[in-house]
Image (cartoon, rainbow, N blue to C red):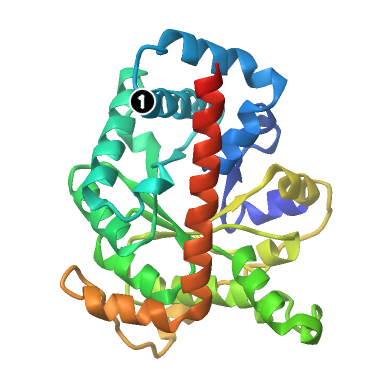
Amino acid sequence: MNQLDALKRHTTVVADTGDFLQIAQYQPRDATTNPSLILKSVLKPEYAPLLDDTVTRYRDRPLDEVVDRLLVRFGAEILRIVPGRVSTEVDARLSFDTRATIQRARRLIGLYEAEGVPRERVLIKIAATWEGIRAAETLEREGIHTNLTLLFAFCQAVACADAGVRLISPFVGRIVDWHKARAGAQWDEAAMAGTQDPGVQSVTRIWRHYKHFGIATEVMGASFRHTGQILALAGCDLLTISPELLAQLAATQGDVPRQLDPAEAARADLPEIHYRASDEAAFRLALNDDAMATEKLAEGIRLFCADAQRLDALIHSR
């Protein structure tokens, strides 16, 4: 058995890509996209007809609507391949605007439904800012399910659970990037591998907390730098994996033992913590106290905003 098939015994495998032509061979259940992945895909010649058709059909519409229609076109194509859900991201430039995030999410769902895609097969990705979490809380009450992304801090995960978010995407690789840069020459790759990896530890802590307290929100580890991080999280609810790492797992023979044990999480002695809608000041202080999370959240939003602007420019040029 290869490692990809072995991993699927414990964890739902998700493809992290906008390149839907690559997906089928790995048979993931779900797929995730983001502004950077969509931009990367539309720059490939094989996707030029899809881009040109969307721009031609909707050239008289506002630019932000054309972008959303393109995202939905990609999402609908992905859903022809995967049996589960696709995650489509709200413009990162709205990360600090609750009302605008809600409005954009409603539009995305409306566009999917116009394509015959039921809302149960779509997760709206939103940055896990305080404003984004509040938007997700409203959307979930409307039956629009959300995936809170750019999640680096435990307080973000707790607040998402309190808000009734369907799924969160705690990052692994970007956490490690921060710690590695901070340690510099003192970083010991071997000593910080496996369960000692700070990104793996972050996801594990969140997963154990959710399982211990019976929280329904799904945990999907994301942002992997190598397969060792993926294997160290076998047993997590879902893992979203790039095509490059999916290929490595599929090409490697061997068993993948479960690492995250629900029985162990149930027995753990963990404190109960909440960051509800009335706890904004406490949430912001907790996030501020986590330098890594504060820096990586801000950086992630900046990068997604930059790629959103590049996608705007590409569409405008057509």
Q: Indicate the position of residue 146 as horizontal and vertical percent values.
A: 34, 48
Residue pictured at 46% horizontal, 72% vertical:
294
Residue 261 visible from this viewpoint: no
6 up-or-down from 65: above or below: below
215 up-or-down from 290: above or below: above
93 up-or-down from 177: above or below: above
> Residue type at mark 1?
Glu
240 up-or-down from 271: above or below: above
The one nearer the camera, 179 or 77, is: 179
The one nearer the camera, 209 or 259, is: 209
The image shows a total of numbered marks equal to 1
Q: Which residue does the numbered mark 1 point to in the structure image? A: 65
Q: Indicate the position of residue 33 as horizontal and vertical percent values.
A: 53, 41
Residue pictured at 31% horizontal, 75% vertical:
284
Is 314 placed left or right of 154 in the picture? right
Is 35 placed left or right of 5 in the picture? left
> 10 Å neighbourhood of mark 1: few (<14), some, or many (≥20)?
some
Q: Quadrant of the C terminus?
A: top right
